[in-house]
Structure formats: structure tokens, C-alpha cells
Image (spheres, rainbow, N blue to C red):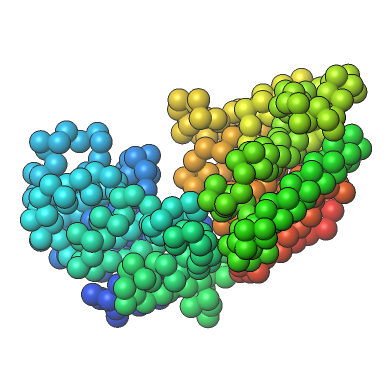
Amino acid sequence: MQERPKYTPRGYQTYILDRIAEFQDTNLLLELDCGLGKRFVTHQIVAERFPDLKFIIVVHSSSSLAETVDYLKGEYGGLEEDLGELSSRVPSPRRPHILKEKRIIVATPQVLAGMAKKDLSLFESFDAILINEVDTLIRRSGGHTALVFPWPSILSLLGDKWLIGMSGTLRDDHAVFTKEQLEIRDELNTLKEHIPESELISMEDLYGTDVESYLEPTFLTIGTVTDVKIRSIATVMDELIRNTRSEIMAELAEGDNLDLVEGDARRVHMLLERLPITEELKGQYSTLLMLRKYIYAMPPKQFLRMFHSDFMKQYFNVSQLRRTLPTVSAKVTRVLQIALNYKKTVVLTSYLEMVSQIQNVLEKAGLTVLVITGQTRDKGEVLREFRENPDTHALVMSPVGERDLDIPQAEVMIICDTINTSKTMYQKMKRTRGGLVVLLAYSGTSEERKVRRLMQRVLERYPWSTAVVEHKSKL
């Protein structure tokens, strides 16, 4: 029988495991950044530190479940006989037997909640629930409850167990509606509310261990893209958005409802559907915001398709723009310039039209390009090809599964368009496990200002592994 390799925990991992043992039976929230071994810590907890306890490990998706089961069985081993799963790929009649037979169960939230509602007695013998990516419990915006389905049910039924929640980061906020009000909450406070009397082990607690030896620094820089026509269109859009927002504030003031938004533009956007204003004004505002996003994130000829409404024709000559705007986005040209200077490049972009254009332009320049979108059947095989084939130069991706991807082979990541949520952007950036991240933005536009604000928030919230670098010659 082949002997499995023995792995010694790193210093910071030993510190974490000692703290968990110290707080046995006390609920815990563990913040451990990308690449620092959350799965290894999980294995150590269930196999080495607490070999006599029964655990349920909850993961947020079916793909994550498959990877976790394979990892626990294959990477370190020792759990083959102990390990079972509750997922859609296990027939319903078989699930109660697995709960009775196995010491460690890996489950998705939906199947776990369904089983607990059906027969709670099946879970009486379990001691602890280990929640992977515990921040995914939080509803980011738009709901009456702070937690996403089915977590209110799971915590209600199984909240008497020892709960251990792990996440790469626990430093964002989220929005919850209370009656007609909007409340911006700290996600850590929300988790502590729903996982009561919990202790926190944060990244700051790991300072003084050897953690800094294993942190892969990520260097951020803005790649400004000059396009006079795009800047002109964006300037008009910014003015239309400001004017529409002023109309919204005026209607709110007329009805003595300004307190709903507290003068905050972000609250206007988040509360839009609930605001006591005309439906026409709501539709106009949301459409303008979406159109501005298209301008920054799509090839020029594609976003012009959205400009054919009577309202937009008052401000733009669409026929003239179609004749004068280039077919290839200036951002795509910049992607090519950067990719030519690196052996391995990852490109993230929001829309399939942009994925196709980047692929075409890079391939015409002689680069070998792989693509991952929601239509990609075997994401793992494409990733393997990019990682292992030295002749593969670029991987272009739409927003699918960034949480589950590790691509340390990439020398540079190019992000073609950004969103305002610092946590989501940080998680995208860390997929390459350090190195250079270039955030593209049209110069002199609101997009450039947004990217600079985003970078500042990322630096403030994740100071241990991010830094800003100035414009580099390769860019």
C-alpha cells in the first residue's frame, strides 16, 4: 500500500488549529485569505484535531462539493471510510443511510436544509458544522432577510451544534431592507448576530506567526485607456444620470421622503424600486445606469444597439456614432499590448461580446487563447490546458466561478471592467495568487474615478497582501 505524504502545518495554521481547540464548543468565525490553506485547515480539524467528532462540512456549490470531497480523499487521505456527501448526485433514498454511516458529511445548503426539515433526528449524533465560505450566507442587497435561502432554516434547525465558519474575507458591508428603510450593515456583525456568541480569528490575529512568508503580494495598477469618443459619450451619460437623480430627489422632497435616501446616491440606486416616485423616473434612472455600464464594458458597435429609444435619440445621433466609432474597443487594443509582453495572461470581462472580440484580436496577433464562459462545459480541462501548456498565452473569462479558480501560473491579470463591490473585486484579483493586476479604465471618465476609489478601498480593507504600483513600461 502506497504511503501518503505527511504534511506539517505551517506556523500560522498551527496557531489557528490551537485557537480552535482552545475554543472547542464555542462558535468560531475564521478569516483566512486566498491561498493560505482553508481546505488544509479543514482536513486538520476533522482528521487530526477532532478525530472522534462527527462533522458536517457545508460548501456553497455542487462544484465546490466535488472538489472538497476529492481533496479530502486524495490530497491528504485518511478519510475514505469516514467521508460521505449530501448532494444532488446522491439519490434521496440513500441520504439517510449516509448520515447514519459516515462521520464526516460534505453537503450543499439546499440538500442539507431539505434533509433537516424532513427528519431532524438524523442529525442528533453530529457534533459540529463547518461552513466553507461563510460570507456567502449574507444577502448582499434587496431582501427582507439578512441571510440567503436556505440558511435561516439551517441555522434555526441546527444552530445548537458547534459552528465554525471560514471565509477568505469578512470585511465588507451589505444592504438589508427594514420596512421601507435601507440599512447598510457590516457583514461580520450580521454573521455574529446569526452565529451567536462566536469568537473571531482574523488575519490581524495571524501577525507574529509565519503568515507573512506565505502571503503572495498582489500589485494593482490602473491601465488608463484613451478614447475621445467614448469619453464624450460617457460625459453626456454622466450628466443625464445626475439630472435624473436630481429629479428623483425633487420628487422625494415634494413628498417629504428625503429621509429614505439620506442624500446618498448609493441608497437611491439600492432603494430605487421601493421609492415613492413615478415608474417612468425609476425606469429612466436604471436604464441610464445600465447603459453607462455597457459603454465602459462592451465593444462600441454592440453598446450602440441599446441607444435606439426615443429618449436616447434626443441626446445622441446613433447613425453618426455608428459610422465614427471603431469596431474594436480601445480596451481590447490595450489588452493585446499588455498580453504581448507576458507569457501567461488572464483577462476578465463581463460580456460575451467582449470575450469574443478579445479572443479574435489576440488570435490574429498570433497568440494562443483559451476561453471560459458560462457555456464552457469542462472548465477544469480548460484551466489545466492554460496552466500546463507553455504555448498557451491567454485565458479570457466572463464572470463565472471566480471564487473557485486558482491560476497562479498567470503573470498578469487584466480586468476590463470593474464593479463597486470591493470584496468581489478582491476575490477576482486573488485568483492568480499574487502578481500584477491591471484594472482598465477609460481616462477622464467616471469609470477612472470609480476604479481609483475601488483601489483605495481594497488597500484599506486588505492591507496585508495588496499594494499599488505606478504605470509600468510593459503596460
Q: Is residue 167 visible?
A: no
State the residue in front, 467 or 330.
Answer: 330
Q: Is 50 drawn above or below residue 369 in the view shown? A: below
Q: Residue at x 27, y 76 (%)?
A: 26
Number of dots carrying numbers: 0
Q: Residue at x 56, y 44 (%)?
A: 407
Looking at this view, is 53 or 89 the one in front?
89
Q: Position of residue 210 (x, y in %)?
A: 52, 73
Tell me the residue at 75%/53% (across/down): 246
Direction from residue 226 to residue 357 in the image, left or right: left
243 left or right of 380?
A: right
Against 459, is 473 above or below?
above
Indicate the position of residue 264 as horizontal and vertical percent values. Answer: 66, 62
Q: Relative to 390, is 20 on the left or the right? A: left
Which of the 4 quarters of the picture holds residue 6? Answer: bottom left
Nearest the viewer among 389 and 242 is 242
Measured from the top left, where is residue 287 in percent x and y? 67, 37
The quadrant of the image that shows the N terminus is top left
Q: Is residue 417 left or right of residue 325?
A: left
Residue 48 horizontal/vertical position (percent): 25, 65
- Assign the C terminus to one quadrant of the image: top right
Residue 122 visible? The answer is: yes
Q: Residue furthest front?
A: 254
Name the image quarter holding residue 306: top right
User: For residue 236, what is the image quadrant?
Assistant: top right
Above or below residue 248? Residue 259 is below
**Which residue is found at the position 76% from the left and 20% from the top?**
364
Nearer to me, 43 or 280: 280
